[in-house]
Amino acid sequence: MHQNSLILIYNGLIVFISFTTLSSSFSTPRPVVPPRFDNFCEQIVGAWNPPKSPGSCTARQVEEVMRSCGGAVQGIREETNMSSSNIGESMYLNRADDGFVYFDCGTYTKCPTQLQLLEDHIPASLSEEDSIILPIVASISFSTQPKSRLVFDMATDSCIPLIKSIGLATCETQSTTDVGNKKLNVPDITWGKETICRMEHGDQPWVLQRAKWEASSSTYDHLLQNKCKMNADEITLNGWINSWDVTKNHGSDSNPIQSNNPNHASFLLPNKTSRIIDMGGVCVNSGEVKSLFIYYDDKGFLQAIVLKEGLMK
């Protein structure tokens, strides 16, 4: 299959495009309305269970958190550990936090606006030469009925599949580590849509309230058109975590901007991009693929977050 590549510079942005002769090109990014927090909460709030594991525990809860003075919802609180010995541990995601970026479908990431030096622990997804600590968490939601998602934690190099339940049902699992840490290589993907969150100019400090939201698409044939109804115990989700140092051209997978890598069809990279983080997953039943790409510059400052959607070939 013949591969092609283009490198364009436009308004201070470097655009890397890699495609095959069978791929349709992406449209020019267009401005879109930012995600609504109430739409996000509708998809994420509730009780979540891991699939297909013996044992018993309490369902993992995601709850709305109200402002202390009353009124609007300020954020969400998600339980972070499902083992019986650690019930009650939780993570608070404040919508006023510049590193908390969410989407209408229920997908989100919580990442630092500036990376810090790593001293002791290097996750398995990074090469030994890396000196960056990545306290990044994310959740990617899929278009299944019942709702399903993958929860990622780069600090522990793990991803956990969860299925949304009705009410306060109990779940079945042995432990978080038994359910998680099942990652795979990125499958062959036909991307259909990108939702981009970035600053207007690459040299601006990251402030989410001032971020520019854009969307780009190829064809709806490369997107899942309807929610897929299936039994909860039949849903199979697989995920991956990858990191690249663009300046050193190394990481946990091949460089995503190389022209011979068909899995990364289109990129919009702010100038001086140094590190790219990719946390993604596939619903094996429907073939739906989603992936979050996070971009940092050569000084470790957050530059852009992109949600890519497509189908497994």
Image: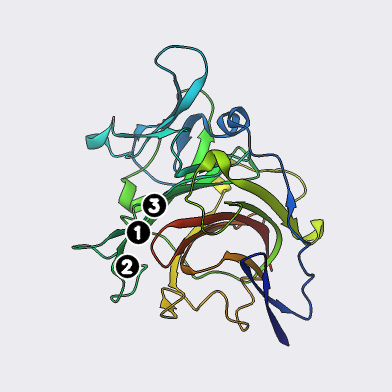
Say above or below: 147 vs 279.
above
- Disc 2 is placed on an element classified as loop
Q: Amino acid at mark 1?
A: Asp
Quadrant in the picture for the N terminus: bottom right
- Residue 61 horizontal/vertical position (percent): 42, 30
Q: Nearer the viewer, residue 129 or 83?
A: 129
What residue does disc 1 label? Answer: 157
| 40 or 34, nearer to the observer | 34
Label 2 crowd bin: few (<14), some (14–19), many (20+), radius 10 Å: some
Q: Which residue is mark 2?
A: 124
* In this rendering, position of residue 247 left or right of residue 187: left
In which quadrant will I find the C terminus? bottom right
Q: Rounded to the nearest whole Å, what is the CA distance between mark 2 and mark 3?
A: 14 Å
Dot 3: element: loop
- Let me know if residue 287 appears in the view: no
Using residue 308 as the reference point, say whether residue 46 is left or right of it: left
Position above or below: 131 against 93:
below
State the CA–CA distance, disc 2 to disc 1: 7 Å
CB under 8 Å between discs 2 and 1: yes
Residue highlighted by disc 3: 136
Please name the amino acid that badge 3 sits on. Answer: Ile
Say which label, 2 or 3, has the lower sequence index: 2
Which marked residue is nearer to the observer: mark 2 or mark 3?
3
Q: Which mark is residue 142?
A: none
Nearer the N terminus, badge 1 or badge 3? 3
Mark 2 vs mark 1: which is more N-terminal?
2
* Quadrant of res 79: top left
